[in-house]
């Protein structure tokens, strides 16, 4: 902590902070991607612990280079698991932070992400549920089948029900997939809201220093509820919580 205090990134322009961050991100991303290929024969849980060291390093470097930290509210709402996480999607930050906050998990994502050199290799090594968004009902069947298999092994499933990143103050259409998986398996849904978009905007190189707030809601029971009812309950909690989290951030350079 003492070393971090010696570096004051606030006077640095936002773009320069981001360049410093990405300059440090690239080499260790390449290293862990190659490592992920080498350790594929290992069982999931030890493989997960090894590969997600990338996340620990990345968020540490984000704090050091950009002055961006986070705090978590509602940890007591995390059930013993496994469960399904439905999270607001505003930036790349939450895709990493959830790995540090919740038990071992896989992510529901578009299959094109697996084609990204190095980064996609790491995602593939963690048994992500990669969907072809153009496949319609076939993609939903894949989500339910593979989601069931992961949950049966004690692995959590994380998805972003809006499907794509939204800017602060915006709201996307919530997809039914997570609700179908919850209704089929009977596991609870844990809703998550955060304001990462204030500090790590989508489609922007800049990173603003500050503290991201992430809030974990009480688990939503899926017993006796339809898929649409489950998604509606998660959407209502997330969007209501976002009304306070999406308040404008102070201007930074």
Image (cartoon, rainbow, N blue to C red):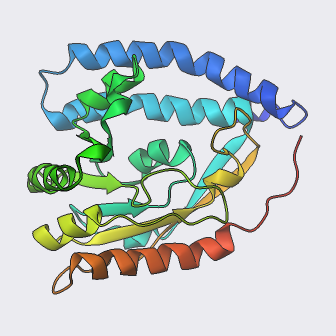
Q: Nearer the viewer, residue 119 or 97?
A: 119
Q: Percent position (x, y) of residue 136?
A: 24, 53
Q: Specify the quadrant that holds the N terminus.
A: top right
Q: Quadrant of residue 159?
A: bottom left
Name which residue lies at 30% across and 67% down.
Answer: 176
Q: Percent position (x, y) of residue 197?
A: 65, 52
From the viewer's perspective, tell me whether residue 35 is left or right of residue 160: left
Residue 28 visible in image? yes
From the viewer's perspective, tell me whether residue 182 is left or right of residue 6: left
Q: Percent position (x, y) of residue 223?
A: 17, 83
Residue 186 visible in image? no
Q: Quadrant of residue 106?
A: top left
Q: Is residue 70 above or below residue 238?
A: above
Q: Quadrant of residue 207?
A: top right
Q: Percent position (x, y) of residue 16?
A: 80, 24
Q: Specify the quadrant that holds the C terminus.
A: top right
């Amino acid at each position: 902590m003492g070393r971090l205090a010696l570096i004051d990134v606030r006077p640095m322009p936002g773009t320069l902070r981001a360049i410093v961050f990405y300059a440090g991100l690239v080499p260790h991303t390449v290293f862990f991607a190659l490592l992920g290929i080498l350790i594929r024969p290992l069982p999931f849980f030890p493989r997960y612990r090894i590969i997600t060291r990338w996340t620990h390093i990345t968020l540490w470097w984000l704090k050091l280079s950009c002055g961006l930290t986070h705090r978590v509210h509602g940890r007591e709402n995390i059930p013993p698991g496994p469960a399904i996480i439905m999270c607001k999607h505003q930036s790349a930050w939450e895709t990493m932070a959830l790995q540090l906050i919740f038990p071992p998990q896989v992510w529901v994502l578009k299959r094109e992400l697996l084609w990204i050199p190095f980064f996609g290799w790491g995602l593939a090594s963690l048994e992500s549920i990669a969907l072809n968004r153009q496949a319609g009902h076939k993609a939903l069947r894949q989500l339910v089948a593979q989601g069931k298999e992961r949950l049966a092994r004690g692995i959590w499933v994380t998805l972003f029900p809006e499907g794509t990143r939204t800017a602060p103050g915006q709201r996307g259409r919530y997809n039914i997939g997570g609700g179908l998986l919850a209704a089929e398996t009977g596991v609870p849904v844990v809703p998550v809201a955060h304001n990462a978009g204030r500090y790590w905007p989508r489609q922007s190189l800049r990173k603003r220093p500050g503290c991201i707030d992430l809030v974990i809601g009480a688990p939503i029971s899926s017993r006796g509820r339809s898929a649409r009812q489950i998604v509606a309950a998660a959407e209502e909690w997330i969007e209501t919580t976002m009304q306070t989290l999406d308040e404008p951030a102070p201007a930074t350079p």
